[in-house]
Image (cartoon, grey):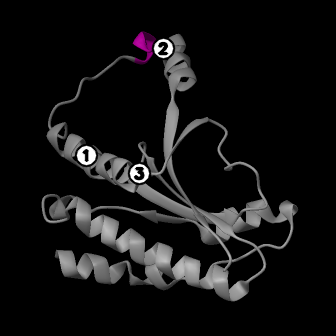
Amino acid sequence: MNKLEYFESLKQIEQDKMWIGKYGRELSKEVSQNMWAIPLPKQLLGDIELQDMIAFLERVIKNRLEQVQKFNKHGMIFYVWLDEETGHLHLNCISNIHKQLPFECETEITENLEEVVEGFLAILEEDIANDDSYEVVEVDEIDDEDEDEDEDNFVLVVYVRQLNVG
């Protein structure tokens, strides 16, 4: 797969129709219906540049904004984050009737889309660099307290853009 084929494969995301809820109780349906996970194949590392991904995401945002304005009931919150465990870039939209994003962890909101996309591109580089170097650890050597501490200190960086009616 080359760069053109990769972005062609993402066209469905770019043109997807949102599910727009009318009530606060519909948050879980909005989350499940509107979420996309975007992987980046290892063979494209170096071919896909920051501005390529930003341009793609701006097209997605434009599409979602047009849908919000056509629906003309209430705005939506478009948000993007990096899932470090899978290495995927996630994007979603929820109605702005919800007062907070549906994450259980601590979040840091940014208006800088590049910050999240840079993390997405960097995590693949790290994975490739570490592909041949790993350490075998015995199960009894794993310290649950260290894992709990990492989870307690974790802060998810989330890009947020308000998509307003009219």
Residue positioned most to the bottom? 70
Cα gap from disc 3 to disc 2, whole angstroms: 31 Å
Q: What amino acid type is highlighted by mark number 3?
A: Asn
Write down the residue under mark 2. Answer: 146
Which label number is shown at residue 122? 1
Q: Identify whether 35 is placed above or below 8.
A: above
**Residue at image coords 47%, 51%:** 111
Q: Identify whether 136 is placed above or below 57.
A: above
Stretch of the chain drawn in magenta: 139-143
Are discs 2 and 1 less than 8 Å apart at CB? no
**Residue at image coords 49%, 73%:** 61
Write down the residue under mark 3. Answer: 112
Residue 7 falls in image quadrant: bottom left
Q: What amino acid type is highlighted by mark number 1?
A: Ala
117 or 88: which is nearer to us?
A: 117
Q: Earlier in the sequence, mark 1 or mark 3?
A: 3
Q: Is residue 5 left or right of residue 161?
A: left
Badge 3 local density, few (<14 within 10 Å), some, or many (20+)? few
Secondary element type, mark 3:
loop
Cα gap from disc 1 to disc 3, whole angstroms: 16 Å
Secondary element type, mark 2:
helix
Q: Is residue 47 magenta?
A: no
Q: Quadrant of the N terminus?
A: bottom left
Q: Identify whether 22 is placed above or below 25.
A: below
Secondary element type, mark 1:
helix
Residue 25 falls in image quadrant: bottom right
Q: Is residue 34 left or right of residue 89?
A: right
Question: Which mark's residue is nearer the viewer, 2 or 1?
Answer: 1
